[in-house]
Image: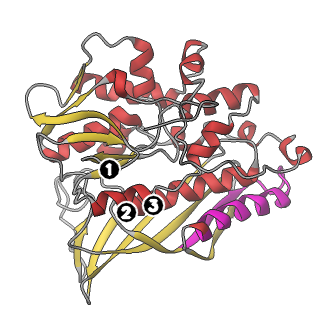
Protein backbone atom coordinates (compact mmCIF):
# COMPACT_ATOMS: atom_id res chain seq x y z
CA UNK A 1 0.00 0.00 0.00
CA UNK A 2 1.61 3.23 -1.09
CA UNK A 3 1.17 6.69 0.38
CA UNK A 4 1.94 10.28 -0.47
CA UNK A 5 4.79 12.42 0.77
CA UNK A 6 2.30 14.74 2.49
CA UNK A 7 0.41 11.94 4.18
CA UNK A 8 2.26 8.59 4.11
CA UNK A 9 -0.57 6.80 5.91
CA UNK A 10 -3.21 7.36 3.22
CA UNK A 11 -2.91 5.51 -0.10
CA UNK A 12 -2.36 7.85 -3.04
CA UNK A 13 -5.31 6.30 -4.91
CA UNK A 14 -7.80 7.80 -2.46
CA UNK A 15 -9.70 10.89 -3.65
CA UNK A 16 -9.44 14.19 -1.80
CA UNK A 17 -12.25 14.87 0.69
CA UNK A 18 -15.18 16.89 -0.64
CA UNK A 19 -15.70 20.43 0.63
CA UNK A 20 -17.27 20.30 4.09
CA UNK A 21 -20.32 22.19 5.27
CA UNK A 22 -20.16 25.94 6.09
CA UNK A 23 -18.63 26.98 9.46
CA UNK A 24 -21.98 27.99 10.96
CA UNK A 25 -23.28 24.42 10.51
CA UNK A 26 -20.13 22.90 11.99
CA UNK A 27 -20.62 25.05 15.10
CA UNK A 28 -23.32 22.60 16.18
CA UNK A 29 -21.21 19.63 17.22
CA UNK A 30 -23.18 16.53 16.23
CA UNK A 31 -20.87 14.17 18.13
CA UNK A 32 -21.87 15.91 21.35
CA UNK A 33 -25.44 14.63 20.93
CA UNK A 34 -24.43 10.94 21.02
CA UNK A 35 -23.10 8.68 23.74
CA UNK A 36 -20.77 6.95 21.27
CA UNK A 37 -19.64 7.45 17.71
CA UNK A 38 -19.82 5.45 14.50
CA UNK A 39 -19.23 1.72 14.68
CA UNK A 40 -17.70 2.12 18.15
CA UNK A 41 -21.29 2.25 19.45
CA UNK A 42 -22.00 -1.32 18.33
CA UNK A 43 -23.20 -3.86 20.87
CA UNK A 44 -20.05 -5.74 22.02
CA UNK A 45 -19.35 -8.83 19.89
CA UNK A 46 -19.65 -11.34 22.73
CA UNK A 47 -23.02 -9.96 23.84
CA UNK A 48 -24.30 -9.86 20.27
CA UNK A 49 -23.36 -13.48 19.58
CA UNK A 50 -25.12 -14.58 22.76
CA UNK A 51 -28.29 -12.81 21.61
CA UNK A 52 -28.46 -14.38 18.13
CA UNK A 53 -27.20 -17.85 19.13
CA UNK A 54 -29.76 -20.55 18.48
CA UNK A 55 -32.42 -18.28 16.99
CA UNK A 56 -32.92 -20.46 13.92
CA UNK A 57 -31.71 -23.95 14.85
CA UNK A 58 -33.44 -24.27 18.21
CA UNK A 59 -30.21 -24.45 20.18
CA UNK A 60 -31.68 -22.03 22.71
CA UNK A 61 -34.20 -24.67 23.78
CA UNK A 62 -37.10 -23.41 21.71
CA UNK A 63 -38.54 -25.03 18.57
CA UNK A 64 -36.48 -24.18 15.45
CA UNK A 65 -38.02 -21.65 13.10
CA UNK A 66 -38.91 -22.89 9.64
CA UNK A 67 -37.23 -21.29 6.61
CA UNK A 68 -39.22 -19.57 3.87
CA UNK A 69 -38.97 -20.48 0.21
CA UNK A 70 -35.66 -19.76 -1.53
CA UNK A 71 -32.09 -20.76 -0.80
CA UNK A 72 -30.30 -18.75 1.87
CA UNK A 73 -26.65 -18.96 0.82
CA UNK A 74 -25.21 -16.67 3.51
CA UNK A 75 -27.09 -16.05 6.74
CA UNK A 76 -26.49 -15.96 10.50
CA UNK A 77 -24.15 -18.94 10.73
CA UNK A 78 -20.69 -17.33 10.60
CA UNK A 79 -21.37 -13.62 10.99
CA UNK A 80 -20.92 -12.61 7.35
CA UNK A 81 -21.42 -8.97 6.46
CA UNK A 82 -24.69 -9.36 4.51
CA UNK A 83 -27.39 -11.92 3.79
CA UNK A 84 -27.40 -13.59 0.38
CA UNK A 85 -30.35 -15.49 -1.13
CA UNK A 86 -30.25 -17.36 -4.43
CA UNK A 87 -33.03 -16.42 -6.85
CA UNK A 88 -34.03 -17.56 -10.31
CA UNK A 89 -31.89 -16.72 -13.31
CA UNK A 90 -28.56 -17.64 -11.76
CA UNK A 91 -28.44 -14.58 -9.53
CA UNK A 92 -28.48 -13.81 -5.83
CA UNK A 93 -29.96 -10.97 -3.78
CA UNK A 94 -27.73 -9.31 -1.18
CA UNK A 95 -29.36 -7.51 1.75
CA UNK A 96 -27.92 -5.53 4.65
CA UNK A 97 -28.62 -2.61 6.98
CA UNK A 98 -26.23 -0.38 8.92
CA UNK A 99 -26.67 2.86 10.87
CA UNK A 100 -24.93 4.63 13.74
CA UNK A 101 -24.57 7.81 15.78
CA UNK A 102 -22.42 10.71 14.47
CA UNK A 103 -18.76 9.94 14.03
CA UNK A 104 -17.88 13.48 12.89
CA UNK A 105 -19.48 16.88 13.46
CA UNK A 106 -19.92 17.83 9.81
CA UNK A 107 -23.41 16.57 8.84
CA UNK A 108 -22.65 16.02 5.16
CA UNK A 109 -19.46 14.13 5.94
CA UNK A 110 -21.35 11.99 8.45
CA UNK A 111 -23.90 11.13 5.76
CA UNK A 112 -21.14 10.24 3.31
CA UNK A 113 -19.37 8.04 5.86
CA UNK A 114 -22.54 6.24 6.94
CA UNK A 115 -23.53 5.51 3.34
CA UNK A 116 -20.07 4.19 2.42
CA UNK A 117 -20.16 2.02 5.54
CA UNK A 118 -23.58 0.54 4.69
CA UNK A 119 -22.61 -0.12 1.07
CA UNK A 120 -19.43 -1.83 2.28
CA UNK A 121 -21.40 -4.83 3.56
CA UNK A 122 -22.57 -5.57 0.01
CA UNK A 123 -19.05 -5.24 -1.38
CA UNK A 124 -17.68 -7.43 1.43
CA UNK A 125 -19.60 -10.46 0.12
CA UNK A 126 -18.80 -9.73 -3.53
CA UNK A 127 -22.05 -8.01 -4.49
CA UNK A 128 -22.98 -4.79 -6.24
CA UNK A 129 -25.50 -2.42 -4.56
CA UNK A 130 -28.66 -1.67 -6.53
CA UNK A 131 -31.00 0.28 -4.25
CA UNK A 132 -30.86 1.74 -0.74
CA UNK A 133 -33.36 3.29 1.64
CA UNK A 134 -32.41 5.80 4.33
CA UNK A 135 -32.65 5.05 8.06
CA UNK A 136 -32.77 8.27 10.08
CA UNK A 137 -33.26 8.98 13.77
CA UNK A 138 -33.35 12.69 14.60
CA UNK A 139 -33.87 14.75 17.80
CA UNK A 140 -36.11 17.20 15.96
CA UNK A 141 -36.61 19.50 18.96
CA UNK A 142 -32.88 19.78 19.63
CA UNK A 143 -31.24 19.84 16.19
CA UNK A 144 -32.35 21.78 13.08
CA UNK A 145 -33.92 19.71 10.33
CA UNK A 146 -31.64 21.54 7.91
CA UNK A 147 -28.77 19.52 9.36
CA UNK A 148 -30.71 16.31 8.75
CA UNK A 149 -31.08 17.39 5.13
CA UNK A 150 -27.31 17.74 4.86
CA UNK A 151 -26.83 14.26 6.32
CA UNK A 152 -29.21 12.82 3.72
CA UNK A 153 -27.49 14.82 0.99
CA UNK A 154 -24.14 13.28 1.90
CA UNK A 155 -25.59 9.78 1.83
CA UNK A 156 -27.19 10.40 -1.55
CA UNK A 157 -23.90 11.66 -3.02
CA UNK A 158 -21.99 8.51 -2.03
CA UNK A 159 -24.80 6.18 -3.15
CA UNK A 160 -24.89 7.87 -6.54
CA UNK A 161 -21.11 7.54 -6.84
CA UNK A 162 -21.62 3.82 -6.22
CA UNK A 163 -24.30 3.60 -8.93
CA UNK A 164 -26.90 2.78 -6.28
CA UNK A 165 -30.43 4.24 -6.27
CA UNK A 166 -31.76 5.83 -3.08
CA UNK A 167 -35.53 5.47 -2.80
CA UNK A 168 -37.01 6.96 0.34
CA UNK A 169 -36.56 5.34 3.72
CA UNK A 170 -37.78 5.59 7.29
CA UNK A 171 -37.31 8.25 9.97
CA UNK A 172 -38.15 8.52 13.67
CA UNK A 173 -37.95 11.21 16.34
CA UNK A 174 -34.99 9.98 18.39
CA UNK A 175 -33.16 11.38 21.45
CA UNK A 176 -29.87 10.71 19.59
CA UNK A 177 -29.14 11.41 15.93
CA UNK A 178 -28.63 8.20 13.95
CA UNK A 179 -28.21 7.62 10.24
CA UNK A 180 -27.51 4.79 7.84
CA UNK A 181 -29.03 2.76 5.05
CA UNK A 182 -30.67 -0.56 4.27
CA UNK A 183 -29.09 -1.72 1.02
CA UNK A 184 -30.12 -4.36 -1.51
CA UNK A 185 -27.73 -5.62 -4.14
CA UNK A 186 -27.08 -8.42 -6.60
CA UNK A 187 -24.32 -10.98 -6.81
CA UNK A 188 -23.23 -14.05 -8.74
CA UNK A 189 -23.97 -16.95 -6.35
CA UNK A 190 -20.99 -18.82 -7.78
CA UNK A 191 -18.58 -15.97 -7.06
CA UNK A 192 -19.08 -14.78 -3.50
CA UNK A 193 -16.69 -13.60 -0.81
CA UNK A 194 -17.40 -15.54 2.39
CA UNK A 195 -16.01 -15.06 5.86
CA UNK A 196 -15.62 -18.83 6.19
CA UNK A 197 -13.82 -19.38 2.89
CA UNK A 198 -10.23 -19.01 4.14
CA UNK A 199 -7.61 -21.73 3.64
CA UNK A 200 -4.27 -22.29 5.35
CA UNK A 201 -1.29 -21.13 3.31
CA UNK A 202 -2.95 -17.99 1.92
CA UNK A 203 -1.89 -14.40 2.73
CA UNK A 204 -4.11 -11.85 4.50
CA UNK A 205 -4.39 -8.41 2.88
CA UNK A 206 -5.84 -5.17 4.26
CA UNK A 207 -7.18 -2.56 1.84
CA UNK A 208 -7.36 0.51 4.12
CA UNK A 209 -5.14 1.72 6.95
CA UNK A 210 -6.37 1.46 10.54
CA UNK A 211 -6.75 4.26 13.07
CA UNK A 212 -9.99 6.03 12.23
CA UNK A 213 -11.47 4.94 15.55
CA UNK A 214 -8.93 6.67 17.78
CA UNK A 215 -8.92 9.75 15.52
CA UNK A 216 -12.72 9.92 15.69
CA UNK A 217 -12.55 9.60 19.47
CA UNK A 218 -10.09 12.49 19.58
CA UNK A 219 -12.34 14.51 17.27
CA UNK A 220 -15.34 13.94 19.54
CA UNK A 221 -13.38 15.06 22.61
CA UNK A 222 -11.49 18.04 21.17
CA UNK A 223 -13.16 19.13 17.92
CA UNK A 224 -9.95 18.57 15.97
CA UNK A 225 -10.69 17.61 12.36
CA UNK A 226 -8.78 14.80 10.64
CA UNK A 227 -9.28 14.98 6.87
CA UNK A 228 -7.21 11.82 6.36
CA UNK A 229 -9.74 9.85 8.42
CA UNK A 230 -12.72 11.34 6.56
CA UNK A 231 -11.08 10.48 3.24
CA UNK A 232 -10.58 6.84 4.21
CA UNK A 233 -14.08 6.46 5.68
CA UNK A 234 -15.79 7.90 2.60
CA UNK A 235 -13.83 5.76 0.13
CA UNK A 236 -15.95 2.92 -1.25
CA UNK A 237 -14.76 -0.67 -1.00
CA UNK A 238 -16.11 -1.26 -4.51
CA UNK A 239 -12.75 -1.41 -6.31
CA UNK A 240 -11.24 -3.70 -3.69
CA UNK A 241 -14.21 -6.07 -3.90
CA UNK A 242 -14.06 -6.21 -7.68
CA UNK A 243 -10.31 -6.76 -7.59
CA UNK A 244 -10.76 -9.63 -5.11
CA UNK A 245 -13.33 -11.33 -7.33
CA UNK A 246 -11.12 -10.84 -10.40
CA UNK A 247 -8.22 -12.47 -8.52
CA UNK A 248 -10.32 -15.51 -7.63
CA UNK A 249 -10.47 -14.66 -3.92
CA UNK A 250 -13.11 -16.62 -2.00
CA UNK A 251 -12.78 -15.20 1.51
CA UNK A 252 -13.13 -11.64 2.78
CA UNK A 253 -14.81 -9.47 5.39
CA UNK A 254 -14.79 -5.78 6.16
CA UNK A 255 -13.16 -4.16 9.19
CA UNK A 256 -15.65 -2.12 11.19
CA UNK A 257 -16.77 -1.95 14.81
CA UNK A 258 -15.05 -5.08 16.11
CA UNK A 259 -11.61 -3.91 14.93
CA UNK A 260 -9.11 -5.83 12.85
CA UNK A 261 -8.57 -8.42 15.58
CA UNK A 262 -12.28 -8.99 16.15
CA UNK A 263 -13.16 -9.41 12.49
CA UNK A 264 -10.07 -11.51 11.81
CA UNK A 265 -10.96 -13.77 14.72
CA UNK A 266 -14.43 -14.32 13.26
CA UNK A 267 -12.84 -15.11 9.88
CA UNK A 268 -10.34 -17.56 11.38
CA UNK A 269 -13.03 -19.27 13.47
CA UNK A 270 -15.39 -19.63 10.51
CA UNK A 271 -12.56 -20.94 8.31
CA UNK A 272 -11.18 -23.33 10.97
CA UNK A 273 -7.66 -21.89 10.71
CA UNK A 274 -5.27 -19.75 12.74
CA UNK A 275 -4.63 -16.19 11.56
CA UNK A 276 -1.11 -14.85 11.99
CA UNK A 277 -0.61 -11.05 11.87
CA UNK A 278 2.71 -9.36 11.08
CA UNK A 279 2.28 -6.42 13.45
CA UNK A 280 4.92 -4.25 11.75
CA UNK A 281 3.20 -4.65 8.37
CA UNK A 282 -0.17 -3.20 9.44
CA UNK A 283 -0.67 0.36 8.03
CA UNK A 284 -2.03 3.19 10.17
CA UNK A 285 -3.30 6.70 9.54
CA UNK A 286 -1.10 9.62 10.47
CA UNK A 287 -1.83 10.64 14.05
CA UNK A 288 -3.33 7.31 15.13
CA UNK A 289 -0.46 6.30 17.42
CA UNK A 290 -0.33 9.74 18.97
CA UNK A 291 -4.07 9.55 19.68
CA UNK A 292 -3.61 6.24 21.54
CA UNK A 293 -0.68 7.62 23.54
CA UNK A 294 -2.81 10.62 24.49
CA UNK A 295 -5.57 8.32 25.74
CA UNK A 296 -8.21 8.73 23.01
CA UNK A 297 -9.39 5.12 23.05
CA UNK A 298 -13.11 4.31 22.90
CA UNK A 299 -14.85 1.90 25.21
CA UNK A 300 -15.78 -0.15 22.13
CA UNK A 301 -12.10 -0.65 21.30
CA UNK A 302 -11.32 -1.83 24.83
CA UNK A 303 -14.28 -4.24 24.73
CA UNK A 304 -13.02 -5.59 21.39
CA UNK A 305 -9.62 -6.32 22.90
CA UNK A 306 -11.14 -7.96 25.99
CA UNK A 307 -13.24 -10.21 23.72
CA UNK A 308 -10.35 -11.50 21.61
CA UNK A 309 -7.68 -11.75 24.32
CA UNK A 310 -8.67 -15.33 25.34
CA UNK A 311 -8.27 -16.35 21.66
CA UNK A 312 -5.04 -14.40 21.11
CA UNK A 313 -1.32 -15.18 21.37
CA UNK A 314 -0.01 -11.61 21.53
CA UNK A 315 3.67 -12.56 21.58
CA UNK A 316 5.73 -9.48 22.41
CA UNK A 317 3.10 -7.05 21.18
CA UNK A 318 2.65 -4.09 23.54
CA UNK A 319 -0.57 -2.41 24.68
CA UNK A 320 -0.34 0.41 22.13
CA UNK A 321 -0.25 -2.00 19.20
CA UNK A 322 -2.97 -4.17 20.72
CA UNK A 323 -5.31 -1.19 21.10
CA UNK A 324 -4.66 -0.10 17.51
CA UNK A 325 -5.29 -3.61 16.20
CA UNK A 326 -8.55 -3.73 18.19
CA UNK A 327 -9.51 -0.14 17.28
CA UNK A 328 -13.20 0.09 16.42
CA UNK A 329 -13.22 1.18 12.77
CA UNK A 330 -16.00 2.96 10.92
CA UNK A 331 -16.22 2.29 7.17
CA UNK A 332 -12.89 0.44 7.25
CA UNK A 333 -11.31 -1.57 4.49
CA UNK A 334 -11.64 -5.19 3.47
CA UNK A 335 -9.69 -8.07 4.98
CA UNK A 336 -8.97 -10.21 1.94
CA UNK A 337 -7.56 -13.73 2.04
CA UNK A 338 -5.31 -13.40 -0.96
CA UNK A 339 -3.41 -10.62 -2.69
CA UNK A 340 -4.92 -7.79 -4.72
CA UNK A 341 -3.37 -4.63 -6.19
CA UNK A 342 -3.01 -1.74 -3.75
CA UNK A 343 -3.61 -3.78 -0.60
CA UNK A 344 -1.04 -4.36 2.13
CA UNK A 345 -0.26 -7.98 3.05
CA UNK A 346 -0.47 -8.08 6.85
CA UNK A 347 -0.23 -11.78 7.64
CA UNK A 348 -1.25 -15.27 6.64
CA UNK A 349 -3.57 -18.14 7.50
CA UNK A 350 -1.97 -21.31 8.87
CA UNK A 351 -3.40 -24.66 10.01
CA UNK A 352 -5.40 -24.35 13.21
CA UNK A 353 -3.15 -24.81 16.21
CA UNK A 354 -3.58 -23.14 19.58
CA UNK A 355 -5.30 -19.72 19.70
CA UNK A 356 -7.18 -18.57 16.60
CA UNK A 357 -5.08 -15.38 16.44
CA UNK A 358 -1.31 -15.03 16.69
CA UNK A 359 0.78 -11.86 16.50
CA UNK A 360 4.40 -11.81 15.44
Q: Which mark is residue 238?
A: 3
Location of residue 293 in the rendering, given as x and y in whole percent from the top left corner: 56, 12
Residue 2: image location, x then y, percent: 47, 37
Count neighbours of disc 2 (C-alpha within 10 A) and say few if under 14, some if 14 to 19, many if 20 or more.
some
Q: Quadrant of residue 287?
A: top right
Residue toward you, 209 or 79: 209
- Pick whichever, 313 or 16, lies toward us: 16
On the question of residue 112 being in view, the answer is yes
Q: Residue at x 40, y 27 (%)?
A: 325
Q: Which residues are magenta?
A: 132-160
- Direction from residue 321 to residue 340 in the image, left or right: left
* CA neighbours of label 1 inside 10 A, class few (<14), some (14 to 19), many (20+): many
Q: CA distance from mark 1 to mark 3?
A: 13 Å
Reply yes or no: does residue 151 show up in magenta: yes
Picture quarter with the N terminus: top left
3D distance between C-alphas at marks 2 and 1: 10 Å
Return the mark for residue 242.
2
Q: Residue at x 80, y 57 (%)?
A: 140
Look at the numbered disc 3 and give the secondary structure of its residue.
helix
Q: Are marks 3 and 2 in contact (CB under 8 Å)?
A: yes
Task: Please give left or right for residue 351 compared with residue 239 in the image.
Answer: left
Residue 98 visible? The answer is no
SS of the residue under disc 1: loop
User: Mark 1 = which residue?
Assistant: 340
Earlier residue among tags 1 and 3: 3
**In the image, what residue occupies the spot 53% across and 48% down?**
13
Q: Quadrant of the C terminus?
A: top left
Residue 263 falls inside the magenta stretch: no
Amino acid sequence: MTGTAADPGVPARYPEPATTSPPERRALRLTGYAHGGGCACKIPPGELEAVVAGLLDGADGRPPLSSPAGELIIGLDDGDDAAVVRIEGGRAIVATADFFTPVVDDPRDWGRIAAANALSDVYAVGGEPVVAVNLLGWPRERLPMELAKEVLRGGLEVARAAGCHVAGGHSVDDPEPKYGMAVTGLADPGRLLRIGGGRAGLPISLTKPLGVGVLNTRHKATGEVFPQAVTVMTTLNRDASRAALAAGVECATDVTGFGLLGHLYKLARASAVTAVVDVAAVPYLEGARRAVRDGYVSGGTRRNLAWVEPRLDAGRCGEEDLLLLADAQTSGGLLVVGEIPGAQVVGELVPAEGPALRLR
